[in-house]
Image (cartoon, grey):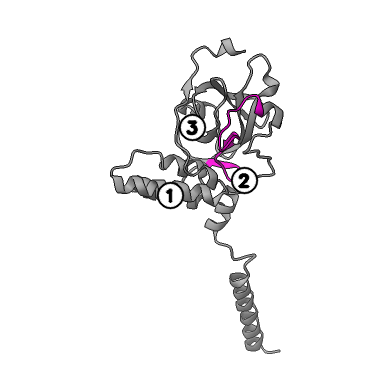
Amino acid sequence: MSNKLFSFLSLTLIANLIYLGLTNPATAKPKSAESAETRASDFGLPTHRRDGGSRSSRDSCVANTENPNLMALIPQKTVGMNAAASPQLFFYVPELKNSSTLEFVLRNEQDQLMYETFLSTKGNGIISIKVPAEVKSNLLQPNQNYRWYLSMICNHQERSRDIVVEGWMRQGRLNLATQQQLNEASSLEKAEVYRQQGFWFDALSALTEDPTSMTEKTMIRQKWSEMLVSVGLENLASEPFIDAKLVENPANLR
């Protein structure tokens, strides 16, 4: 075989391999798509966004409301991503027959306590719980999974009757281009950027920022509803926000 023919065949083979690599979906996946899939992963970790309390305990504890279940506002089977300096999680809280006390706990994968707080609420609706910035900066590490629990305490002397939801969060980092984009974005634009990047908690948080106009307020409500519908929580899309106040003397609850 001549050198010219050998060179021609070699170049042809290389060109075909490159073409197959570029057109094969399994090998030609963009890096951005890979990172988005990673951020939407469940990492093999269980999530229970709806309380699993027995009907008898709930009947004796929760008031008769349209939505009687404690719910975490998260996708069904993914670890919630967070990039904020003070991570914020959202929950729907049903009304208890008596005053409601909540316990929020955050632990690492080694089950070490990272953060704990107690809150009180009245009525039913959506609350947000923030992990203080100092907790994140001192304890939470990027690309590590952290397990959270929210317990609705029905009886302080019988904690086995608590109504509980649980899941995982994961601290992530934004690249410089995304951060610059967010710096110039409105609340609605921020929510969409975060959603596309897989930062679910940050997307919801952006929608709780004070709107600058009634038009924006209406659009934010629509976006909030759209996001909840997208993860199967349409029954909570119109629920109001309610206050959750820190309990000053949590030791009295133990």
Looking at the image, which residue sits at the far front?
64
Residue placed most toward the observer, 59 or 234? 59
What residue appears at the point 53 percent right and 52 percent down from the top-left corner?
230
Q: Distance from label 1 to label 2 (Cα)?
A: 19 Å
The disc at residue 34 is none
**Residue at point 63%, 65% (across, down):** 27
Task: Residue under label 1, please give it.
Answer: 223
Q: Marks 3 and 2, Cα distance to the nearest angstrom?
A: 19 Å
Region of the chain picked out in magenta, as a range: 59-81
> What's under tag 3, amino acid-wise?
Ile
Q: Are marks 3 and 2 in contact (CB under 8 Å)?
A: no
Q: Residues within 10 Å of mark 1 (few under 14, many from 20)?
A: some
Q: Quadrant of the C terminus?
A: top right
Q: Does dot 3 land on a helix, a strand or a loop?
A: strand
Q: Type of residue at label 1?
A: Lys
Q: Residues within 10 Å of mark 2 (few under 14, many from 20)?
A: some
Question: Where's residue 250, x and y in %?
Answer: 55, 14
Work out whether mark 1 precedes mark 2 in sequence or the reverse, and give the earlier one: 2
Bin the neighbour count of mark 3 within 10 Å (Cα to Cα): few under 14, some 14-19, many 20 and up: some
Q: Secondary structure at mark 1?
A: helix
Res 175 visible: no
What x and y, as percent, mark residue 36?
55, 53
Query: Could you tell me how far apart the alpha carbons at marks 3 and 1 are, in whole angstroms?
Result: 18 Å
Judge depth for marks 3 and 2 and give the one in front.
3
Pointer 3: what residue?
127
Q: Please name whichever residue, 87 or 141, is drawn nearer the observer in this view of the structure.
A: 87
Query: Which of disc 1 and disc 3 is earlier in sequence?
Result: 3
**Mark 2 lies on residue:** 76
SS type, badge 2:
loop
Left or right position of 54 against 171: right
Q: As shown in the figure, which amino acid type bears the numbered disc 2?
A: Gln
